[in-house]
Image (cartoon, helix red, strand yellow):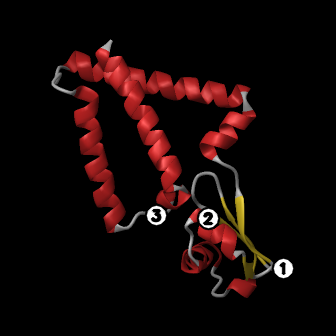
Amino acid sequence: METVLRAASMYLVLMVVLKIAGRRTLLEMTSFDLILLLIISEATQQALLGNDFSVTGASLTIVTLVVIDILFGMLKSWMPRLELLIDGGSLILVENGKLLPKRARQAGISEEDILLSARTSQGLERLDQIKFAILEKNGKISIIPQS
């Protein structure tokens, strides 16, 4: 039972930490983000397994994490407010070519992040060419160009 409790607690801790870190962490990773992810995964592995390096312990941990993920998916489909709390909603960052600085700051997104997304997805170079830039739940920035 200790393995199940370890897995459940680490799942919740990581979910809270990533929620606090914001969707900015879901955008394309820099080398710093990759290093941080590797360190987090190593620390998580040690916390999940403790001194139990058996195949049974690892299997039980994996099954527990998958079951928790499935349960959260089911809960989110039954309670839309829970989905909004866990995953958040879409956030408009640019409206009619104007950056909404408070929202961008809240999301931890810079104007350069938006312009990078605009260049790569739509070939746009300036904010005034963007009708809407929307930060999606998955951390990607959707760009809708001006007509």
Q: Earlier in the sequence, mark 3 or mark 2?
A: 3
- Quarter of the image containing the N terminus? top left
Pair 3/2: label in front: 2
Q: Is residue 60 visible?
A: no
- The answer for how far apart the CA atoms under marks 1 and 3 are is 28 Å
Q: Is residue 100 above or below residue 62?
A: below
In the image, is 85 to the left or to the right of 98?
left
- Could you give the CA–CA distance between mark 1 and mark 2, rounded to whole angstroms? 28 Å
Sequence-first disc among 1 and 2:
2
Q: Secondary structure at mark 2?
A: helix
**Pointer 1 local density, CA inside 10 Å: few below 14, some 14–19, many at least 20:** few
Residue at image mark 2: 106
Query: Mark 1 falls on what kind of element?
Result: loop
* Viewer-nearest residue: 130 or 84: 84
Residue 129: x and y in percent read: 74, 84
Q: Residues within 10 Å of mark 2 (few under 14, many from 20)?
A: few
Going from N to C along the chain, the mark reached first, 1 or 3, is 3
Q: Is residue 145 left or right of residue 39?
A: right
Q: Residue furthest right?
A: 147
Q: Position of residue 122 (x, y in %)?
A: 65, 76
Residue 147: mark: 1
Q: Is residue 15 left or right of residue 80?
A: left
Instruction: Please name the amino acid that badge 3 sits on.
Output: Glu
Image quarter hosting the C terminus: bottom right
In this figure, which residue is indicated by the disc labeled 3?
28
Q: Position of residue 146 (x, y in %)?
A: 80, 79
Q: Which residue type does callout 1 highlight? A: Ser
User: Residue 80: which quarter of the image?
Assistant: top right
Q: Nearer the viewer, mark 1 or mark 3?
A: 3
